Amino acid sequence: MAEAVAFVKRYFQQQAELGSSEWYLSPETSAAASRKRSLADLCEKVRDCRRCHLWTTRTNVVFGSGDERAHVAFIGEAPGKDEDLQGKPFVGRAGQLLTRIIEAIHFRREDVFISNILKCRPPENRDPLPEEIEECLPILDAQLQILRPKMICALGRIAAQTLLGTNAPLSRLRGHVHDLRGAEVIVTYHPAALLRNPHLKRSTWDDVQLLRREYDRL
């Protein structure tokens, strides 16, 4: 007992000498706290990003949101009007549908991480330009390096092609488990496409069930 007390005392002394005001006895908790700080630092760095011209038309940078301990990340294409106004990803009609999809496979939105390839809204919600993707992709790469998710769900053609570095059509990418630096990637339709084409919902359901099965297997 005395040895345990002495160990704890030394731990707190060491943390105080390092200038820490937060205490973590669990390595897992400490790692989660480190990821949270790293994400917060990255978010602060890109808050005023001017890497491409989209900063001239945006209202907010839409960094991403979710649990820093998340094992699953959902990556879309770019923010829309509602996301640009609120500074949060997937909060409009497509976002509400995404939330229902996440819940349907027994996750909670707050337990996953959600982001986009682009962090700023393209005017009139047009497709991202190649140069915009090139400038913004390092931010997403940094996010994924911090989070290290086990599973990534690519939402839509642009997200899938960008993450996987391919020009293959969505039809060829769906239904397979892809690898991205050790993370398994599942490809499906963007929720906005489901709002325009409800007949795609069945295929999307098949895709996210594949994600859930792979997650359970891992």
Image: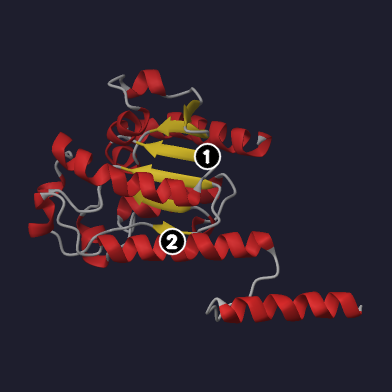
**Percent x, y of residue 91:** 33, 59
Residue at point 44% right, 28% down?
203
Residue at point 61% right, 76% down?
15
In this figure, which residue is indicated by the disc labeled 2? 38
Instruction: Judge whether residue 173 can be spotted in this image.
Output: yes
Dot 2 surroundings within 10 Å: few (below 14), some, or many (20 or more)?
Answer: some
**Percent x, y of residue 122:** 15, 48
Q: Earlier in the sequence, mark 2 or mark 1?
A: 2
Residue 14, by quadrant, is bottom right
Q: Are marks 2 and 1 in contact (CB under 8 Å)?
A: no
User: Which dot marks residue 46?
Assistant: none
Dot 1 surroundings within 10 Å: few (below 14), some, or many (20 or more)?
Answer: many
**Percent x, y of residue 184:** 52, 33
Q: CA distance from mark 2 to mark 1?
A: 20 Å
User: Which dot marks residue 151?
Assistant: 1
Task: Look at discs 2 and 1 and give the one toward the viewer.
Answer: 2
Residue 119 sits above or below residue 192 on the image: below
209 on left or right of 41: right
**Percent x, y of residue 7:** 79, 74
210 on left or right of 122: right
Coloring scheme used: secondary structure
Element at label 2: helix
Residue at point 31% right, 23% down?
166
**Camera-nearest residue between 204 and 138:** 138
Residue 84 sits above or below residue 13 on the image: above
**Camera-nearest residue between 210 and 120:** 120
Element at label 1: strand
The amino acid type, in three-letter code, at marker 2 is Ser
